[in-house]
Image (spheres, rainbow, N blue to C red):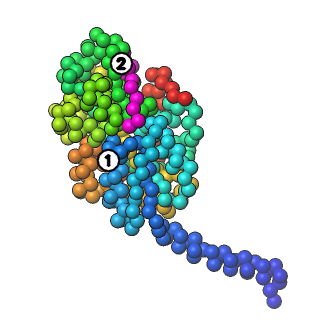
Amino acid sequence: MPTASHRYSFAFLAALLACAPSALAQKADWPVRPIRYVVPFPPAGATDILARFVAEKVSPMLGQTVVVENRAGAAGAVGTEFVVKSASDGYTILMATAAQAISETLYTKQPFSFARDLAPVAQVARVPNVMVVHPSLPVKNVKDFIALAKSRPGQINFASSGPGTTLHMSGEMFKLMTGVDIVHVPYKGSAPALTDLIAGHVSVMWDNLPAAMPHIKSARLRPIAITTAARYAGMPELPTVAESGVPGFEASAWFGVMAPAATSKDVITRLNTAINRAVALPDMRERFEQQGAIPVSATPEEFGAFIRAEIAKWAKVVKASGAKVD
């Protein structure tokens, strides 16, 4: 005959078994409502463009709308902090960029850790940066630009999408490696920076190729070099910065999806599978390439290792440039 302790054990086990199906169902049913996809930069920049491509394809795969929401400010820190503080339930995700990897060492008082407080989900793309100038600037190539900048120390301004972005740090790297004295003018995103560059209020910019491409095609901006180690296949006539007189120069942007750190492995796996499927679609690859982006598929673990390497790489540039943001 069962003792009182046995009866208690049976009741406890029965309660656990009763809860188990609902817990399993909760995981199996995800997602049951729209997913918020936070872009930590303004609309019309490369981050926003690529995120909207991904959202469009992933939504039907998951059976729920993936809503892109722009939360710009502080070189991506505003939107990133919003996701860090969101529930770890798979309903809020972030379009992460190299800017956050740079910010790990650039910002001295950041209220979160990009590496610790977010979980890698899937890499989406890598994007070359392109060095573009206003057509009125009397330069045709990098050597011309260096000569002009050295003849006008402190008089040429370069735009970026904000402190700590790859656009900013590409300019800082260029300054370090060439010895030119050019002045950084930060904006709240790539789109407003491009607007001022096209208007001639600033002279040069190292921008993500997807955002700059339409203005290059319309001749409103003049490209003088690509920032990757090798020439970009979509613009084979454009030389690299390295082969244009700055050996060793290499910088590119990247984009990927991350979620709050405690998000379940099951949810991350489902998101990773859907995003990798979306990026591999022929029409998606074509759209990415038209924008100057190189599609990338990776496991969460591979993306995590890539992020750690990026943080270490840009930490060296931040230290060498002496750049700090409180």
Left/right placement of residue 79 relative to residue 235 reads: right
The type of residue carrying mark 1 is Ile
Residue 257 in the magenta stretch? The answer is no
Secondary element at image label 2: loop
Q: In this view, does 15 lie to the left or right of 321?
A: right
The C terminus - image quarter: top right
| Residue on which the image places disc 1 | 49
Residue 234: image location, x then y, percent: 20, 40
Q: Which residue, as the protein is rendered here, is positioned at the far top?
A: 151
Task: Inspect this view and state whether residue 250 appears.
Answer: no
- Residue at the extreme right of the image, as rendered: 4
Helix, strand or loop at label 1? It is helix
Q: Is residue 81 visible?
A: yes
What amino acid type should be assigned to the residue bearing mark 2? Ile
**Rendered image: mark on residue 182:** 2
Q: In which quarter of the image is residue 206?
A: top left
In-front residue for pair 209/307 = 209
User: How many other residues sit within 10 Å of disc 2, few (<14), some (14-19) or many (≥20)?
Assistant: many
Please check the rendered image and state whether residue 188 is part of the magenta-colored stretch, yes or no: yes
Q: Residues within 10 Å of mark 1 (few under 14, many from 20)?
A: some
Relative depth, front residue between 293 and 53? 53
Query: From mark 1 to mark 2, how far is it between C-alphas?
Result: 29 Å
Residue drawn at the location 35% of the way across and 65% of the way down: 60
Which of 237/38 is in front? Answer: 38
At x 53% / y 60%, what residue is drawn?
Answer: 89
Q: Position of residue 287 (x, y in %)?
A: 24, 51
Which stretch is magenta? 174-189
